[in-house]
Image (tube, rainbow, N blue to C red):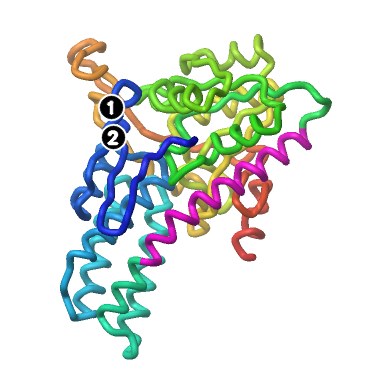
Amino acid sequence: MSLESIKYQRGNLEILDQLLLPLQTRYIKVLGVEDGWKVINKMQVRGAPAIAIVGCLSLAIELLKDDSSDKKVMRQEIEGKLNYLVSARPTAVNIKLAAEELITLANTLSADETVSADTFKERFISFIENMLVKDIEDNKAIGNFGCEAILNSLKGDGDIRVLTHCNTGSLATAGYGTALGVIRSLNKSKRLEHVYCTETRPYNQGARLTAYELVHEKIPATLIVDSMVAALMHVKKISVVIVGADRVAANGDTANKIGTYQIAIVAKYHNVPFYVAAPLTSIDMSLKSGDRIKIEERPDKEMTHIGEFRIAAPGINCWNPSFDVTPASLITGIITEKGVFAPDKLHEVMNQ
């Protein structure tokens, strides 16, 4: 059974505090938009799909408490609160696209004179709730398409060794996962020999979260430190790299957790296919290339400390970008819920 990072029933939203994993399992109640912003910004919930869902559900929770009978007031409040939620983590595009879609819906409902304030609220909240269901369906489709493409591309009947970076499983989505969803599907095919996951410094999402999920799912796996990737590909003969994405530009350039770019370079040198697994909501066709992607920079303390224990020399300067951009030329294919596409063919699926 997949881990559950988001617990939702109408009127109640709880998220698994990922800062405490793997040593503690504790859920936090999200009572409204302010709580939603905080758990996203503090990375108690993370992963581009999960950020979007939790942010939007926090708005649904708040709307349920709102007894306003003025549609125009609700519409204005919705737009302001969605824009506020987007500011919590600016690199992940999913919440930005979800906010734009919800603002359009609010404008449409507000302008329709046949729609009462109660109907406005019900239809708006139901739309958000459906995002949770759709994300799991999309993730399973990503897993199946990715598994099929990888099995077809790798010659012979040998078992597959996968390298993945950061966390892209149930903890980063509504359930099942993107890159880790592909790994789950490969495991079901009985062709998966082993998974190698990076620690993913400085926040250690790989060591804390991906390793936790792989152990939970009883998938054969080994943890490596980030600087071992080149040696791993040389010694262990990795079959394929599968990573997630926080934003994909129109040309296929992909922003993902810091360290992804260098893995793609090493994979290219070793002739290892490099796949990105992401829902269509991670693709931002408004950006021509990855140069336009805003990269979030995180606090120095994430590098200088482990918990409250300082590991770096006092006084040293730090540069802590949370993401880097992998050029499309290094990417074999982008796995979506609609199929697997070469980076330069994304416009075809987005225009379907």
The reply to whether dot 1 and dot 2 touch (C-beta < 8 Å) is yes
Q: Can residue 331 be seen in this view?
A: yes
Residue that appears at 43% across and 58% down? 131
**Residue 109 left/right relative to 335:** left
Q: How crowded is mark 2: few (under 14 residues within 10 Å), some or many (20 or more)?
A: many
* Residue tagged 2: 17
Element assignment for label 1: loop
- The amino acid marked with disc number 1 is Leu
Q: What stretch is highlighted in magenta?
A: 126-153
Residue that appears at 27% across and 55% down? 58
Q: Quadrant of residue 108?
A: bottom left
Residue toward you, 151 or 250: 151
Residue 1 x %, y %: 49, 35
- Vertical side of 87 occupied by 180: above or below: above
* Residue tagged 1: 20
- Vertical side of 71 occupied by 333: above or below: above
- Vertical side of 150 occupied by 119: above or below: below
C-alpha gap between disc 1 and disc 2: 6 Å
Which quarter of the figure is the C terminus placed in? bottom right
